[in-house]
């Protein structure tokens, strides 16, 4: 009976279980709240699995479509659907939420029900923004997500949490309101439709496309985040609780990149092509400069946050590599794989830091040393994730980076050379941090008192390790579902540029 | 001719209300101190009956009566219903407050109901004179209400300021109206429009009159640069009265503006659109920026109200049916937000303690997760974040502005509302991120608590399913602005 409502389930199951958890009430019932949240998250994750199994790989368009009129005055539809590009993010998100609930199990002791509810509700909203086929519906989910994230950082965050949460909120709001204006303009231009597909089929003049590009850029670049509008991210990450960092890095950053792919490239292809140098330039700055910044961080979470910016630079780079009017298919697919891989790896890295933080209550690299002596199991897993973060072959981190560099070589050799430095910087900052934290003699009494991971933590680590290795060894499982949609997108972008060129002649 | 002109049916709600208030006033003389609850019950009952009469006499078409002085159209019906509902909620929220402060007297109820009657007359007026009568009935009752706490210096000062500035605004308005009369030889809304349309009017006079009228209207709406009275009145008035000043009169002001500009002077839209644009942008800018500096919640809400009125003006400025419908939706849903906001202040207020400082909100979410949630909804709705109704209302105004072709204006307004988001976020921060300073019980008034939760749920529900209210506003505007 739910066959045609799988996406609605993916959105509303977590939201409803979140609301249910809210009603559990105070911390005296914390145990109940945790279990309801876990069951809710597990059921929501299971509900997204049919999306994977029933997905038709060769079909390029939207699948699992649902369409109802939501607000008739503005012709806004409750229209849901996913293609090969968005499929994995819905699943990845539901998966991460499950891990986040586990990660916060005993760690969160105050206002447990609110914590769990915030993550569950956010999970539903994120699924909504990936599945929306209507621009305003996308916007509603995209913006509403700010509310739970604001609360998560602000309530359960570190000492500078208020500053970080307000900064996060205002930065993102500023960008997304311009997006709203762009949508309203496109609504007018398309003769009263908010359907993303209708937006994509418009042939707009170059000047209009440039303006739209600016609006899209303002919104999505902040979310990705790209240099130089990235400064909210290290603050938000450092102050957020472990679960918050995991969701932020694994999922919400991806919405920015997804926005470029879904809106910016197909709606403003001429402007995207013309200004692709800007994106490439900023992406390279992120890869190289932010990589260096990561190298000198003394705080582990900050280091991983900067490494996220650097990795996301790779993603945006992959999206904007034009050869003539054609996007490079390897680079686009590589960037998508990189997004998924980074979702797993960054979640794992933040979780590892969280494991140590819960025991020592410090994120400073200098406070650690010789952890391997007291936490051998943990050290082994951490090494795997560190290697994946550095892009070691056979881990998921390698596939995406390799494909993007390959694509970049075809587009421009020097871009590829600069992009490839990520392999050096990535290895540099990750492994150096690993060395200082894990190896060496036991540094102090705190480290000496460390206990190795418990069953719950081990479970999370094993799941993450399995996915990181699995994706590294058999990336085609993911890639084969993307081919059709990516090819379709590339053709659309190329055709539309030709159409606009034809108009102006 | 005379008989047709004396069709009293369209004015039945106002007539009933007048009788009911008079009875309540008389009744008060015979009531003992401890049986005052009858006053509240009587007031609520008369509101319900009035609403029922409004529903029954309301028609889908437009009816004129009293020699075209009075009109009953769907717009009037809608706004009367909204105003009655608003006053009903104010009575429910304010009961504890007025009891604690010795204002639980018939004056409070009678003045409030008279003000409501003024609103009803104003939204049904089809002639500049009857509009003015309605406006003054509303204004004079409000002046007295603001100064109701007569032992309080603040309250008296606020009443004085409100009166002097309000009288000034009325003067300007009257002066403008007299110029329009001089230019067109008529005070009837439709006739003025026809005469200007036929080219028989003295346009110089009418245009000068228009400037005065817009200034007077801006005063009443509290739009920048005529907003000076708003924060002081909000701050000085007893909170239960502030709640009134901040809500129902805005409904009337919206109808007033749209009738005068949209129905009587549509031919001059080129002139008034420019003025309204300036008013709107300044209101949104100054309202939002100044609100950041406030430490008193009531003052903050005052500046926030100024910026919200900017959005209402913006919708009228577009001068399209979509624009009027957007403004109508905005002003109706704004009632929910402002009532919720002041309801929260009342929740923190107790006998001898005004919970109107920002710091009083600290840790509200820990003291009561339920009302923390209501606060969250109210604040994010005011900031215009989706899943709350505030988003839909801002969205409809922006969409009307863009449909009118003004992209730059939309961008400016959008950037200014980011500034606005900051102080709403700060409130959420106080309530959610900070530890409570006081562990005192919140208000114990069960009826009010219940209503406040329902209020919050409405904000959420209309944010997710706004279709029916949007439909209603659209129908209302279509029927009333067709002529």
Image: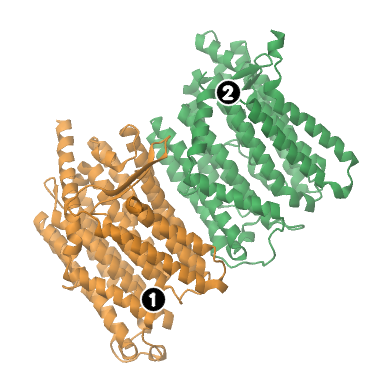
Chain colours: A orange, B green
Which residue is at the front of the view, A360 or B448?
Answer: B448
| Observer able to see residue B86 | yes
Report helix, strand or loop for mark 1: helix
- Residue B282 horizontal side relative to residue B137, left or right: left
**Residue named by callout 1:** A354
- Picture quarter containing residue A180? top left
Report helix, strand or loop for mark 2: helix
- In the image, is residue B479 above or below residue A84? above
**Quick check: do tags 1 and 2 share a chain?**
no
Please name the residue shown 11% across and 46% down the image. Answer: A324
On-image quarter of the N terminus of chain B: top right
Please name the residue shown 21% across and 68% down the image. Answer: A471
- Residue B435 horizontal side relative to residue A103, left or right: right
* Chain of the residue on which disc 1 is drawn: A
* Chain of the residue on which disc 2 is drawn: B
- Picture quarter containing residue B480? top right
Please name the residue shown 26% across and 48% down the image. Answer: A62
Q: Which mark is residue B83?
A: none
Which residue is at the front of the view, B89 or A289?
Answer: B89
User: In the image, residue A158 lies at what x, y percent?
Assistant: 46, 71
């Amino acid at each position: 009976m739910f066959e045609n409502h799988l996406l609605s389930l993916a959105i509303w199951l977590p939201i409803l279980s979140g609301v249910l958890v809210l009603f559990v009430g105070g911390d005296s019932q914390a145990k109940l709240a945790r279990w309801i949240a876990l069951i809710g998250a597990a059921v929501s994750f299971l509900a997204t699995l049919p999306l994977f199994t029933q997905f038709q790989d060769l079909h390029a368009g939207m699948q699992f479509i649902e369409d109802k009129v939501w607000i008739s005055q503005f012709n806004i539809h409750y229209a849901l659907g996913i293609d090969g590009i968005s499929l994995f993010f819905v699943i990845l998100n539901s998966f991460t939420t499950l891990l986040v609930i586990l990660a916060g199990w005993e760690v969160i002791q105050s206002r447990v029900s609110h914590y769990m509810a915030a993550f569950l509700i956010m999970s539903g909203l994120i699924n909504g923004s990936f599945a929306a086929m209507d621009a305003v519906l996308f916007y509603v989910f995209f913006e509403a997500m700010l509310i739970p994230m604001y609360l998560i950082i602000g309530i359960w965050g570190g000492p500078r949490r208020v500053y970080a949460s307000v900064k996060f909120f205002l930065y993102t709001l500023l960008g997304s309101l311009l997006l709203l204006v762009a949508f309203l303009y496109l609504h007018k231009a398309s003769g009263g439709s908010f359907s993303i597909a209708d937006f994509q089929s418009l042939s707009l003049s170059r000047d209009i496309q440039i303006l739209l590009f600016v609006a899209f850029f303002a919104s999505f670049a902040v979310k990705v985040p790209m240099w130089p509008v990235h400064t909210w991210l290290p603050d938000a990450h450092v102050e957020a609780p472990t679960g918050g960092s995991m969701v932020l890095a694994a999922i919400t950053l991806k919405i920015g990149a997804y926005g470029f792919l879904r809106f910016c490239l197909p709606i403003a292809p001429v402007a995207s092509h013309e200004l692709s140098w800007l994106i490439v330039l900023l992406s390279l700055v992120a890869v190289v400069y932010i990589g260096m910044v990561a190298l000198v961080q003394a705080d582990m979470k900050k280091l991983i946050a900067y490494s996220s910016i650097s990795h996301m630079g790779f993603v945006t780079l992959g999206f904007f590599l034009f050869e003539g009017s054609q996007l490079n298919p390897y680079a686009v697919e590589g960037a998508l794989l990189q997004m998924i891989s980074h979702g797993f790896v960054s979640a794992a890295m933040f979780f590892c830091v969280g494991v140590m933080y819960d025991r020592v209550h410090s994120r400073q690299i200098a406070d650690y040393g010789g952890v391997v002596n007291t936490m051998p199991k943990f050290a082994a897993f951490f090494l795997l994730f560190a290697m994946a973060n550095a892009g070691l072959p056979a881990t998921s981190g390698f596939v995406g980076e390799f494909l993007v560099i390959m694509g970049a070589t075809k587009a421009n050799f020097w871009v590829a050379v600069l992009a490839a430095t990520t392999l050096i910087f990535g290895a540099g900052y990750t492994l150096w941090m690993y060395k200082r934290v894990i190896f060496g003699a036991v540094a102090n009494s705190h480290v000496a008192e460390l206990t190795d991971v418990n069953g719950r933590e081990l479970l999370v680590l094993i799941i993450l390790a399995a996915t990181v290795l699995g994706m590294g060894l058999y990336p085609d499982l993911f890639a084969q579902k993307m081919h059709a949609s990516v090819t379709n997108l590339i053709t659309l972008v190329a055709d539309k540029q030709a159409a606009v060129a034809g108009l102006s002649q | 001719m005379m008989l047709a002109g004396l069709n009293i049916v369209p004015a039945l709600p106002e007539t009933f209300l007048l009788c009911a208030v008079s009875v309540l006033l008389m009744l008060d003389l015979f009531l003992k101190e401890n049986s005052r609850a009858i006053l509240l019950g009587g007031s609520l009952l008369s509101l319900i009956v009035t609403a029922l009469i409004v529903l029954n006499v309301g028609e889908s078409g437009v009816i004129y009566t009293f020699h075209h002085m009075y009109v009953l159209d769907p717009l009037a019906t809608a706004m009367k219903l909204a105003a009655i509902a608003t006053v009903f909620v104010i009575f429910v929220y304010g009961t504890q407050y007025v009891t604690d402060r010795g204002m639980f007297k018939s004056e409070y109820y009678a003045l409030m109901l008279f003000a409501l009657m003024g609103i009803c007359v104003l939204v049904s007026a089809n002639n500049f004179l009857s509009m003015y009568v309605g406006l003054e009935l509303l204004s004079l009752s409000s002046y007295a209400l603001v100064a109701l706490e007569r032992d309080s210096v603040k309250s008296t000062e606020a009443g004085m300021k409100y009166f002097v500035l309000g009288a000034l605004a009325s003067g300007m308005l009257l002066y403008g109206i007299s110029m329009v009369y001089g230019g067109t030889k008529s005070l009837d809304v439709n006739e003025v429009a026809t005469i200007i349309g036929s080219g028989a009017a003295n346009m110089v006079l009418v245009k000068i009159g228009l400037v005065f009228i817009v200034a007077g209207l801006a005063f009443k709406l509290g739009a920048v640069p005529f907003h000076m009275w708003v924060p002081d009145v909000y701050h000085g008035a007893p909170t239960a009265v502030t709640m009134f000043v901040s809500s129902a009169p805005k409904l009337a002001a919206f109808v007033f503006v749209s009738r005068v500009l949209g129905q009587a002077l549509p031919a001059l839209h080129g002139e008034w659109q420019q003025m309204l644009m300036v008013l709107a942008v300044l209101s949104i800018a100054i309202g939002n920026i100044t609100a950041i500096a406030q430490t008193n919640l009531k003052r903050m809400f005052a500046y926030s109200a100024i910026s919200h009125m900017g959005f209402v003006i913006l919708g009228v400025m577009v001068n399209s049916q979509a624009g009027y419908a957007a403004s109508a939706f905005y002003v109706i849903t704004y009632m929910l937000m402002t009532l919720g906001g002041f309801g929260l202040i009342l929740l923190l207020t107790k006998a001898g303690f005004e919970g109107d400082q920002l710091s009083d909100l600290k840790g509200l979410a820990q003291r009561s997760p339920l009302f923390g949630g209501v606060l969250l909804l109210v604040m994010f709705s005011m900031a215009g974040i989706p899943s709350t109704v505030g988003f839909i209302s801002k969205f409809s105004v922006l969409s009307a502005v863009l449909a009118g072709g003004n992209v730059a204006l939309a961008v400016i307004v959008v950037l200014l509302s980011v500034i606005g988001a900051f102080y709403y976020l700060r409130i959420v921060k106080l309530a959610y991120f900070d530890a409570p300073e006081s562990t005192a019980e919140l208000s114990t008034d069960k009826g009010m608590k219940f209503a406040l939760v329902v209020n919050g749920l409405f904000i959420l529900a209309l944010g997710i399913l706004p279709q029916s209210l949007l439909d209603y506003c659209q129908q209302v505007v279509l029927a009333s602005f067709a002529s």
